[in-house]
Image (cartoon, rainbow, N blue to C red):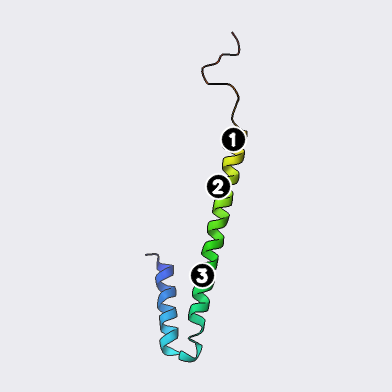
Amino acid sequence: MRPTFLLLSCLLIGLSVAAPAHAYLVPLIGGLGWLLAVAFGGILAAATFVWALVVKWRGRNDTTPGDDATD
């Protein structure tokens, strides 16, 4: 488990126990964290698709490795 996640979890649990008047922040912060994770995952998926499109598909030669153009 990442230390940041553990510290954030302890903070949220402490907030909900120590300050019940502000307990509404717990799902709000959790939801924002979830949205950030989904957005970051979407950015990574888009970057992977662009990398595959540009590097793999467009950068491919039409010749096969066994062909010798000098023959």
Q: Does residue 21 lie above or below 3 as drawn?
A: below
Q: Determine which residue is flagged by label 2.
A: 48
Q: In this view, does 45 lie to the left or right of 1?
A: right
**Residue sitting at 60 percent across and 45 percent down?**
50
Q: In the rendered picture of this protein, how many numbered marks are placed on residues?
A: 3
Three-letter amino acid code of the residue under disc 1: Trp
The image shows residue 41 at horizontal and vertical percentages of: 53, 57
Element at badge 1?
helix
Kindly report which numbered mark, 1 or 3, lies closer to the viewer in this rendering. 1
The image shows residue 19 at horizontal and vertical percentages of: 46, 90
**Residue sitting at 58 percent across and 51 percent down?**
46
- Sequence order check: which comes first, mark 3 or mark 2? 3
Q: Determine which residue is flagged by label 1.
A: 57
Three-letter amino acid code of the residue under disc 2: Thr
**Residue sitting at 53 percent across and 62 percent down?**
38
Q: In this view, does 3 lie to the left or right of 21?
A: left
Q: Determine which residue is flagged by label 3.
A: 33
**Residue sitting at 56 percent across and 41 percent down?**
52
